[in-house]
Image: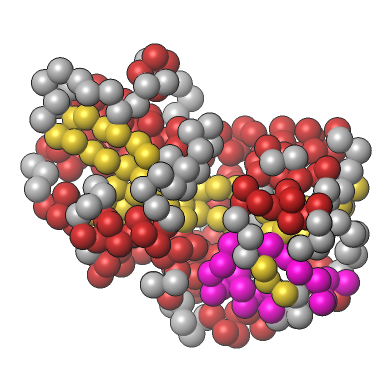
Amino acid sequence: MKRRTFLKATSLAAAALAAPGIVRAGAEKKLRIGTITPGSHFWTQTMDRVGVSLAEKSGGKFETQVFPSGQVGNEATMIQQIQSGGLDMGFLTVAEFSNRLDDMAALFTPYLVPDVSQASRLLTGPTATGMLEQYSSLGMKGLGFGLGGMRHLISREAGLTSADLAGRKYRITPFAPLRDFYELMDVAPTPVPLPGLFDALANGQVDGADIDLELAWKLKLYDQAPNLTITSQMMFPVVAVVSGRYWAALSDSEKQMLSESVAEQIDWLFAQYVEFEPKWLNDLKGTGINVAEAAPDFFGDTVTKWNGIWEAKAPSIAALRAEAKELT
């Protein structure tokens, strides 16, 4: 199966990347992009790079402005703005879209892929690419899926099996497939904004969190939750979507430039996670916290029960599973 090759290098100027959104002489097209992540996060950096790439490909005809950290609203608000044309583009979690498109839950199927390398290949494969067409029902053009690492558990107290988690409060991203996963273990899924997670762990508001290695390290969660269980039970995808109105107003050549820029920079994003996931894990181990590796049986019958709920709701699960088997 063919797929795009990860970018190993780029001609994008560092100075331009440091200053996205600056008005360029001769700019004819404005592109406003919203993200929920800060400027230092790989997702926002990816969109910054898209803007620079577009300027290069178009000879300066595109002017791109990226609004990080939810400056134009939370993800639900940004989706509404993209649908109305008030915002041109977003790089948003598939989690938020799964609340509107049940089939997007397929991308959160437990143990679909074991690591970020295979996740990146699956997310650019034929099944996921076909799933992008579903965004047209929301008045958007889906341009590509990216990644935010694999999911793990970090907690204040050690847990050897899923039974040990029963009755505990775990911070999750609030969307149905993940909420079901934890409720099946009798865990109380507790939404907490990421900026408040450190304090929520410190004061006992939550006992742990469903988290990726990047945030566990960068938010210093290990200071309050010194038990990390490497489960890799789900990937956490992100999707680039463009307003249907904006897309319709572009010429064929402009559509091609935008699509190519997004595809190239999403490949760059994948490469960052492939490189940094093992580094973050080593950094976390270096803090002296308890790090345990867990096999799928850690979750007992939770995975089987989850499949029983979601296989009927998310028909793409079967095709993704078949495709994932070919990646090993």
Residue 278 vertical placement versus 118 (above, below): above
Image spot of residue 295 (x, y percent): 80, 62
Magenta residue check for 168:
yes
Q: Tell me which segment is drawn in magenta.
A: 164-183
Q: Residue at x 76, y 63 (%)?
A: 206
Image spot of residue 140 (x, y percent): 25, 59
Residue 323 visible to an observer of this rendering = yes
Question: Coloring scheme of the render?
Answer: secondary structure
Residue 11 vertical placement versus 254 (above, below): above
Image spot of residue 149 (x, y percent): 60, 48
Task: Write down the quadrant of residue 131 in the picture.
Answer: bottom left
Q: How many marks?
A: 0
Query: Relative to the observer, which residue lies in front, 67 or 286?
Result: 67
Q: Residue at x 44, y 47 (%)?
A: 70
Q: Residue at x 31, y 52 (%)?
A: 241
Magenta residue check for 240:
no
Residue 34 vertical placement versus 129 (above, below): above
Q: Residue at x 30, y 34 (%)?
A: 65
Residue 4 visible to an observer of this rendering = no
Residue 29 vertical placement versus 158 (above, below): above
Query: Relative to the observer, which residue lies in front, 10 or 236?
Result: 236
Query: Relative to the observer, which residue lies in front, 218 or 325?
Result: 218
Viewed as shown, does residue 79 lie left or right of 85? right
Viewed as shown, does residue 38 lie left or right of 164? left
Task: Write down the quadrant of residue 294 in the picture.
Answer: bottom right
Image spot of residue 161 (x, y percent): 86, 69
